[in-house]
Amino acid sequence: MHNPITIKELLEVKEGEQFQFKEAKKRFDANEAVRCCCVLANCGGGRLVFGITDKRPRQVVGSAAFEQPERTRRGLIDKLKVMVDFQIYDYEGKRVLVFEVAGRPAGLPVQADGVAWWYEGDSLIPMPEKIRRRIYEETGFDFSGSVCAAADMSDLDENAIETFRTRWIEKSGNKRLGSLSVEQLLRDCEAVTEDGITYAALALFGKRKSLGKYLPQAEIIFEYRSSEASGPASQREEFRVGFFACYDRLWELINLRNNKQHYQEGFFVYDIPTFNERVVREAILNAVSHRNYQMGGSVFIRQYQDRLVVESPGGFPNGISLDNILDRQVPRNRRIAEILALCGLVERSGQGMNLIYELSIKEAKQLPDFVGTDDSFVSITLNGLVIDKNMLSVINKIGNEQLEILSTSDFLVIHALYHEMGLTENLRSRLKRLTDLGIVEHTGRSKYVLARSLYSAIGKSGVHTRMVGLDRETNKELLLKHIRNNGREGTPLKELYQVLPGHNRGQLQILLRELRKEGRIFCEGNTNAARWFAAELLGNSGDCNLISPVLLIRKIRTV
């Protein structure tokens, strides 16, 4: 890109993988143009030329195709997800239009409408499988570490660099960094090398004008939308500047509309922000570190009242999928990730996504959502609403001391058990450790539930009894087990509904009546105020506080 070519050179070059010529004197099919550009991108980039014959000796015939080339350019970028530019020539009164298409990203074929196009002779065909495999096997290239030959130190913003310097000193405690020249500081973090300015330096420290010239796709666009309606956003700001120049401003914009959700436990009231600052920053850092800078398109941050959506071009890096996103780290832009790690914005271990999951569970919010992610874009939705305040009580009951030693998988087990979801084999391997910690109980051959104390903390010990007793032969045994567990405190009717939530009042009364007739339970009180006890309490002659059998019989009421 950014390499002008003359008409004379166009007349002399060979048509092939990098050049395609179309006369198109009046018009040209837009879909075929997309496919032609797709092939050029898959062949490393090239030019699609309108208004010059393809047969030698070539002649300039002029073309009226695509009268609005800027509109066509945007359409090509939207379709192909790579950068496209154009040039218009007036050669002896004849119009020549040239679209310049960037090469495909490393390890990823470019597709148009779901097909990676290729040339076989003069024919457009789907890319052969052997070529696709060869592309997918590409590894090791770090675009962010490569050098932008035309850039120099004047293209970098010193204020952004000083922000980075301050953070690096705070992270490392190395005050010597404060005395280094700007160029030496950037050499020490390898943003600048002997060969020149890297694309990492431009993405992190570049001036607006410089990014527009060398790396225009390194742009972050923030939008706030007060509703789901289409149309202009309520607020929109575009940042085509180095990341260190806009990083804090992005959080300021999001925090302007960051409502608090109140949660009370006992006498204490806690405020849970809709948007957790650590989660938001990690999601933005992840987009900047892992987006594909060889593809067109900006990073979008769209804020709604109850959620935040972060979209970044490039799809998941090779080897990463939703199944292993928490267990495997493959940095697409190693140089950028290393610089961000130096100043403490990201961890070298690549645990940003793990933190997002853990904090979402701690705040009883939905897990991150990747709906909309494909080979060309990663879309992550951060849901801000607390979905179950009782889950917050469970987390508080576990306590900070234990929470600090839990892994992301441990948090996912707690989340799954609380919401009565199934566990993968990987998560089941964590059950023994959580049982040893007293967070989980083993209740059968392969059955585990959260500890009774955690359910008691939220007034749902009946739920615990139901889950423990799911494999009992009769519902009466479930009820009896729960009544026994409550001992002398007795069991109110509302808890028994928790044990058997699918039963109505009449069905529950029948079961209780049968248990009482069998002499296994008794009750005190009337209707909803009644409390149920296990008959075994009567056999404890050492407890003089128990009601005598004679008096007890007089107190029995029909519920």
Image: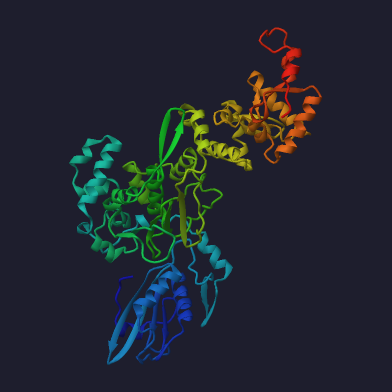
Q: Is residue 246 above or below residue 511?
A: below
Give how far across and how far down residue 44 sits, in percent: 43, 69
Q: Which color mode does the image show?
A: rainbow
Q: Is residue 110 visible?
A: yes
Q: Residue at x 51, y 73 (%)?
A: 117
Place residue 415 in its image quadrant.
top right
Picture quadrant where residue 504 is located: top right
Where residue 163 appears, x then y in whole percent? 24, 46
Q: Specify whether 180 is left or right of 47.
A: left
- Give the image location of residue 464, x and y in percent: 64, 32
Q: Is residue 331 above or below residue 445?
A: below
| Nearest to the observer: residue 482 or residue 548 | 548
In the rendered image, is residue 195 in sight? no
Q: Is residue 483 left or right of residue 267?
A: right
Q: Which image quarter is the N terminus in? A: bottom left
Q: How many marks?
A: 0
Residue extending furthest right?
518
The residue closer to the viewer here, 123 or 397, is 397
Q: Residue at x 25, y 49 (%)?
A: 186
Q: Is residue 536 above or below residue 341?
A: above
x, y (%) of residue 228? 44, 60
Question: In the image, what residue occupies the spot 36% across and 92% down?
Answer: 61
Q: Image quadrant for the C terminus?
A: top right
Q: Name which quarter of the figure residue 424 lies in.
A: top right
